[in-house]
Image: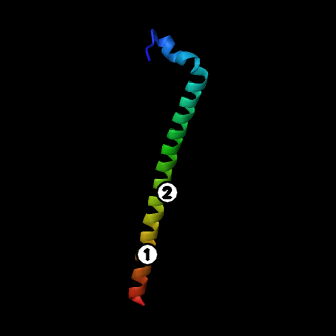
Amino acid sequence: MYWASLGDFLAMGGHAAFIWPAFAIALIALFGLALLSRWGLAVAERDHAQARRDAGRDRDEGDRA
């Protein structure tokens, strides 16, 4: 497809009212998923580190008994 100007491209052949909001929603969703994934990873890493510390304490207490 060929556009004569930037305005023609942004108009998307008369479908801009549907295309640009869909594009914005998709970008927002992807950005939100990326943030939630990073947050979930941080929580999982923190929980894993705590579980390893707890397991180490249990093992040490078992050696003393």
Secondary structure at badge 2 equals helix
Residues at marks 2 and 1, CA–CA distance in whole angstroms = 18 Å
Camera-side residue of 25 and 48:
25
Q: Is residue 20 left or right of residue 52?
A: right
Q: In the rendering, at what x and y percent does residue 59 appear?
A: 40, 81
Quadrant housing residue 17? top right
Q: In the rendering, at what x and y percent does residue 33 appear?
A: 51, 44
In the displayed structure, 37 sits above or below 12; it is: below
In the displayed structure, 29 sits above or below 48; it is: above
Q: Write the residue at 43% across / 14% down.
A: 2
- Estimate how packed mark 2 is, as few (under 14), some (14 to 19) or many (20 or more) residues with alpha carbons within 10 Å: few
Coloring applied to the structure: rainbow
Q: Which amino acid does label 1 sit on?
A: Ala
Tag 2 near tag 1, CB within 8 Å? no
Q: Quadrant of the C terminus?
A: bottom left
Farthest front residue? 1
Secondary structure at badge 1 equals helix
Q: Write the residue at 50% across / 12% down.
A: 8
Q: Write the residue at 43% across / 65% down.
A: 49
- Estimate how packed mark 1 is, as few (under 14), some (14 to 19) or many (20 or more) residues with alpha carbons within 10 Å: few
Identify residue for label 2.
Answer: 43
Q: In the image, which disc is placed on residue 36?
A: none
Q: Which amino acid does label 2 sit on?
A: Val
Identify residue for label 1.
Answer: 55
Q: How many labels does the image show?
A: 2
Q: In the rendering, at what x and y percent does residue 10 appear?
A: 51, 17
In the displayed structure, 52 sits above or below 32; it is: below
Farthest right residue? 17
Q: In the rendering, at what x and y percent does residue 1 appear?
A: 44, 18
Label whose residue precedes the other's in the sequence (2 or 1): 2
In the displayed structure, 36 sits above or below 9; it is: below
Q: Write the residue at 46% across / 49% down.
A: 38
